[in-house]
């Protein structure tokens, strides 16, 4: 019984600490240092978890035909991965952002000649 009480007190303290951390540096928000705040839970990769929380609502605002600069402004930061290639005489650029940490889903934004041509969710 004594062990159960001690365990309950420890869990309560840990929950309180997480709430304090979340109020100081809310997960998935841009910090004053220009970095996305990490998740304060038991995630395997807390930084990736925070970045997915940050990215998901912003990717939802992207539309076909937007320019690289418009997408960069919406996202508020550079892509996590970037690739370039030429296809049929057109420049193809892809930007990737993690948008669902638990499901390992990355959003891939494709640009043809500097404009959004597709947006796909890819499970990694």
Image (tube, helix red, strand yellow):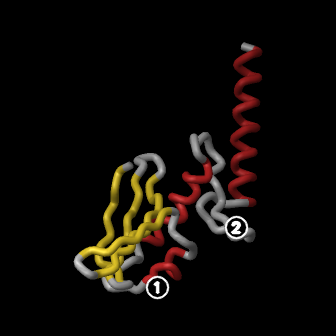
Q: What's the CA distance linking mark 2 and mark 1?
A: 22 Å
Q: Residue furthest top?
A: 1
Pointer 2 residue: 31
Residue at 59% across / 61% down in the picture?
28
* Residue at 61 percent of width and 53 percent of height: 47
Please provide percent x and percent y for residue 124. 38, 49
Q: Is residue 90 above or below residue 7?
A: below
Which structural element holds mark 2? Answer: loop
The outermost residue toward the left is 88
Residue 105 location in percent, x, y? 40, 53
Quadrant position of residue 32? bottom right
Q: Secondary structure at mark 1?
A: helix
Decide which of 7, 92 is in the foreground and name it.
92
Residue 16: percent from left, percent from top: 73, 44
Please give the residue where the numbered disc 1 appears in the rendered image.
Answer: 70
Residue at left offset 68%, top offset 55%: 22
């Amino acid at each position: 019984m004594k062990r159960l009480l001690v365990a309950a007190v420890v869990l309560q303290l840990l929950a309180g600490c997480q709430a304090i951390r979340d109020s100081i540096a809310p997960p998935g928000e841009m910090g004053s240092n220009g970095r996305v705040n990490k998740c304060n839970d038991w995630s395997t990769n807390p930084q990736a978890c925070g970045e997915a929380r940050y990215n998901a609502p912003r990717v939802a605002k992207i539309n076909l035909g937007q320019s690289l600069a418009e997408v960069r402004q919406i996202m508020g930061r550079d892509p996590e991965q970037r690739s370039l290639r030429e296809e049929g005489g057109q420049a193809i650029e892809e930007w990737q952002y993690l948008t669902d940490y638990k499901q390992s889903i990355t959003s891939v934004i494709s640009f043809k000649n500097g404009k959004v041509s597709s947006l796909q969710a890819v499970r990694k």
